[in-house]
Image (spheres, rainbow, N blue to C red):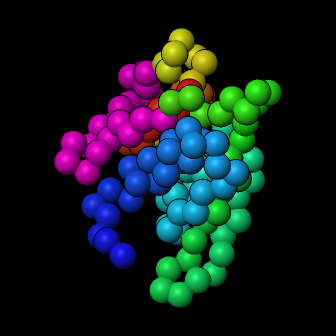
């Protein structure tokens, strides 16, 4: 097992690669932040369901990927914005629109992990984790 310096980036890459390869599910090492991001992706309709498996030494999350008609992946693009080497923080007025509102940004705020529209409504900013479209 190799050491991953950016676990969130690793998770996004697994989701991206899995949907491009038309896999039914991907398995991701567990962390509470990853589960929160996956909850947002599920609520926004980018993934099917997810389950957390108790494993030793680390729990795992298996994520059901979602496809439209003709097996077109629901996630066409997923990009890490705030990286460990360069964190990206925005206030509520600076949250970017993704593809003119067709995509979402996921932020980690003081009120938890949320999608860009919720953060704008609640007028909270935070760390801009990733964009999905």
Picture quadrant where residue 128 is located: top left
Q: Position of residue 53 (x, y in %)?
A: 66, 75
Q: Position of residue 32 (x, y in %)?
A: 53, 65
In percent of the image, x 30 and y 37: which residue is there?
Answer: 88
Q: Position of residue 82 (x, y in %)?
A: 32, 41
Magenta stretch: give its range.
78-96
Identify the residue at the far right of this view. 69
Screen quadrant of the N terminus:
bottom left
Screen quadrant of the C terminus:
top right
In percent of the image, x 38 and y 30: which residue is there?
Answer: 91
In percent of the image, x 44 and y 47: which residue is there?
Answer: 13
Q: Nearer the viewer, residue 4 or 41?
A: 4
Picture quadrant where residue 74 is located: top right
The answer to whether residue 111 of the structure is visible from this angle is: no
Identify the residue at the far top of this view. 100
Q: Nearer the viewer, residue 128 or 74?
A: 74
* Magenta residue check for 73: no
* Magenta residue check for 79: yes
Left or right relative to 61: residue 49: right
The answer to whether residue 29 of the structure is visible from this angle is: yes
In percent of the image, x 39 and y 22: which residue is there?
Answer: 94
Identify the residue at the far left of this view. 85
Q: How many marks?
A: 0
Left or right relative to 7: residue 38: right
Above/below status of 83 relative to 67: below
Q: Position of residue 52 (x, y in %)?
A: 66, 70
Above/below status of 12 relative to 6: above
């Amino acid at each position: 097992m190799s050491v991953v310096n950016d676990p969130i980036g690793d998770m996004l890459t697994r989701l991206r690669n899995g949907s491009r390869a038309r896999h039914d599910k991907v398995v991701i090492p567990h962390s509470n932040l990853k589960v929160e991001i996956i909850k947002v992706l599920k609520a926004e309709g980018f993934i099917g369901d997810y389950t957390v498996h108790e494993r030793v030494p680390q729990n795992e999350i298996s994520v059901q990927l979602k496809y439209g008609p003709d097996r077109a992946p629901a996630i066409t693009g997923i990009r890490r914005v705030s990286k460990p080497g360069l964190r990206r923080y925005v206030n509520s007025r600076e949250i970017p629109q993704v593809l003119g509102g067709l995509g979402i940004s996921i932020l980690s705020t003081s009120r938890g992990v949320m999608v860009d529209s919720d953060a704008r409504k609640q007028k909270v900013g935070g760390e801009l984790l990733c964009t999905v479209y």
